[in-house]
Amino acid sequence: MKQRIQQQIWIAVLAVTFSIGVHAQQDVWESFDYPELNSFDMPELEIFEIDNGVRFYLVQDAELPLIDVTVLIRAGGVNIPDDKVGLNSLVGTVMRSGGTNEYPGDALNELLENRAAIIETQFGFTSGSATMNVLSEDFERLLPVFMDVLRQPAFPEPRIELAKTQQASLIARRNDEQGSVANREFQRIIYGEDSRYSRRVEYATLDNITREDMIDFHAQAVVGSNLMVGVTGNFDMEEMKTLLEQAFGDLPAGEKNELKFPEVDYEFEPGIYFVDKPDVNQSYILMGHIGGMRDNPDYAALQVMNRVLSGGFSSRLMQVVRSEMGLAYSVFGSYGSGVYFPGTFSAGVMTQSETTSEAINAIIAQIERIQQEPISEEELSQTKEQFLNTLVFQYPSISSVLRERMSNDYAGLPPDTFERLVEEVRQVTVADVQSVAQRYLRPDSLRILVVGNQAELGDQLQQYGEVQPIDITIPE
């Protein structure tokens, strides 16, 4: 399996090199000669579960003298109350930086550096993780250290204060970059200012978080019922199973966390929103509406449609808005399909202030075009081949394949999700692309956000309706 992945990567690299050297004047996608995609086989897994609910996924890989461990934890920011947003991130940071009573942070760093080993922890919005990468010969020595970090973090006050200071610094700088402002505010425009999906860390929420909050979050998260453990590398299967059962066996089973994802209350209504940023001479534009869910039967067709519209250098937005019209520094887009809650459909562009409305209109025209005109068979074929061949880069190693399988199980997706996607993409037709564009894209109901310089923009935005200003002042 891994050899096939490497072969596909080298084929893709050679194709890129050849196209650059011989076809430099052609569009990149037109010069690619894509090989037939080989079938993709997930590695053989040893899957077992112990009495306290911990589920294990083991794959042997003797190519390198390394062992990689990933613990997936069912806990995240989605369940954090509004007045303590940021708690999950702080827990993930200080679990590692603060170390344990036996291995304080600095001592832990030194130990790992001396062994060329890595231990990391983090908690995101929908899940957390603890990871370790070590030489095979050091695994038994460092597994107890890893378990100590996972199970008994010290959460020392000085490290908590340092993590809070770092977070506060991020808050203070969050309006520096146009793109960061645009993406943050676009989420609030789509999901709503009070939505759990658009919350942000504030000084006040940081101040509300106590050490006891962090200890409670950790205690509820790190129990057997919430853990999935993946191990890949050079090891003996039976010996590894014994070591893992001993390491994780005395964890309390606890209660499995129920991740609560509120319904998205969305109406397809257009709007024009503006953030005045006087220190820039260009506009950062995002426009779109609510997207869909990953389990949509039309998912593959939507992704092919998205590639035609906005997927890289060969996309219509890039070819028309940037190459032909010369309006954009960059142009991009996606049709988001969430696993837990709906994603967003968006198209975006960075353009000079004076061409802001022209760029907006050009993007809208391309969205309408893909609805009104069937794409060509050649465009479909090139897009599908490009899509299928880039999928191989998602799985450059055995461990990445294993993590994908664990993620699918965590989210309740079928184990063969990847294989199904490959087959469904192959079956997408010209009619399918136009059909999903007509059903799921709403160019008449776009919510348009512009982050730019009001003095340079003038009245360009008035044509889209009453402009709604957005205040990005950071609360003290």
Image: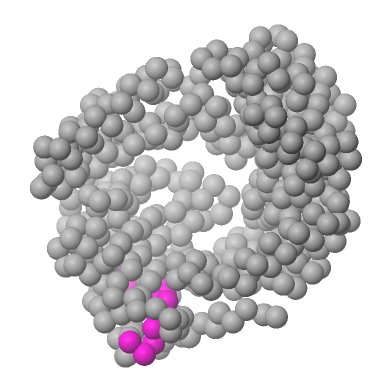
Tell which of 407 and 390 is nearer to you.
390
Q: Say which quadrant the C terminus sits in.
A: bottom right
Residue 48 figure quarter: top right
Front residue (pair 57, 369)? 57
Identity of the residue drawn at 65% across and 25% down: 134
Is 453 magenta? The answer is yes
Q: Nearer the viewer, residue 130 or 256?
A: 130
For the image, the number of numbered tags is: 0
Residue drawn at x 66%, y 11% is 237
Figure check: 411 above or below 159:
above
Looking at the picture, does residue 299 appear above or below residue 245?
below
Instruction: Name the residue located 35 percent from the left edge and 47 percent from the top edge.
Output: 303
Q: Is residue 304 within the magenta segment?
A: no
The magenta stretch spans which residues? 442-456
User: Coloured how?
Assistant: one colour
Determine which quarter of the picture holds residue 437.
bottom left
Question: Which percent across, then down, holds residue 3?
Answer: 39, 17
Judge whether 272 appears above or below 188 on screen: below
Q: Could one spot residue 339 in this view of the protein?
A: yes
Q: Is residue 132 left or right of residue 337?
A: right
Q: In the picture provided, is 215 more to the left or to the right than 400?
A: right
Percent x, y for residue 418?
A: 44, 32
Is residue 221 among what the camera can see?
A: no
Q: Residue at x 76, y 25 (%)?
A: 143
Residue 366 image offset from top left, x and y in percent: 23, 63
Q: Is residue 358 left or right of residue 112?
A: left
The image quadrant that residue 77 belongs to is bottom right
Measured from the top left, where is residue 215 in percent x and y? 86, 50
